[in-house]
Amino acid sequence: MARPEETDPYAPPPMHHDRSGPVLRLAILGVLIGGAVWGYTMFASQPQTPLVAETAQEQQMADAGYTVSPSTLPEATSESLPQAAPAPAAPAPQPRRTARAPAEEPATVDPVPPPSMNTAPVSPQPIPPVDVPPVG
């Protein structure tokens, strides 16, 4: 008589083991490394622009071509303008205070008496009962 197999009726069926995991990981790693190498060669072969302007070229500034020297200004312009009231004189600046030793006389302070320890003990007050109406 054949021996009955002792298997758990509630055990899950045997799993299919997929062996393509390592191959897929190597393929993804190869694609990433290949992309990095391709990007480096593409960007490394580009012409580089200088970060600082060339010193051989002279910079040009916008110029309207209008220049006035102070000696050519007419002096009569101040006479044609109405005279404003003279500004009040500014007060003389105060001398800066410097750190110095404290005054010779100490400031007088009223002495504060120590707290009194002769207080009478206080008895606790009972809380009056509160009438609570019944529910319902």
Image: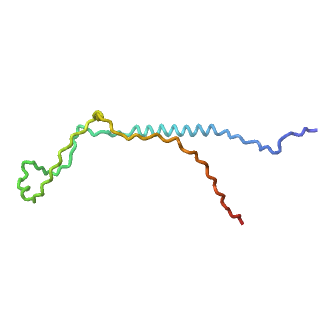
Q: How is the image coloured?
A: rainbow
* Horizontal arrangement in the rendering, residue 55 relative to residue 84 (left or right): right
The quarter of the image holding the N terminus is top right
Question: 98 left or right of 132?
Answer: left
**Which is nearer the eye, 46 or 59?**
59
Image-based side of 49 in relation to 55, left or right: right
Residue nearest the viewer, comparing 16 with 115? 115
Residue projecting furthest to the bottom = 136
Q: Residue at x 63, y 37 (%)?
A: 22
Closer-to-camera residue (65/131): 131
Q: Quadrant of the C terminus?
A: bottom right
Residue 20 appears at what percent x and percent y? 65, 40
Q: Residue at x 20, y 49 (%)?
A: 62
Image position, residue 119 (x, y; %): 54, 44
Q: Give the residue drawn at x 21%, y 42%.
A: 94
Count of numbered tags = 0
Question: Which of the pair 74/17 is nearer the observer?
Answer: 74
Q: Position of residue 28 (x, y in %)?
A: 57, 40
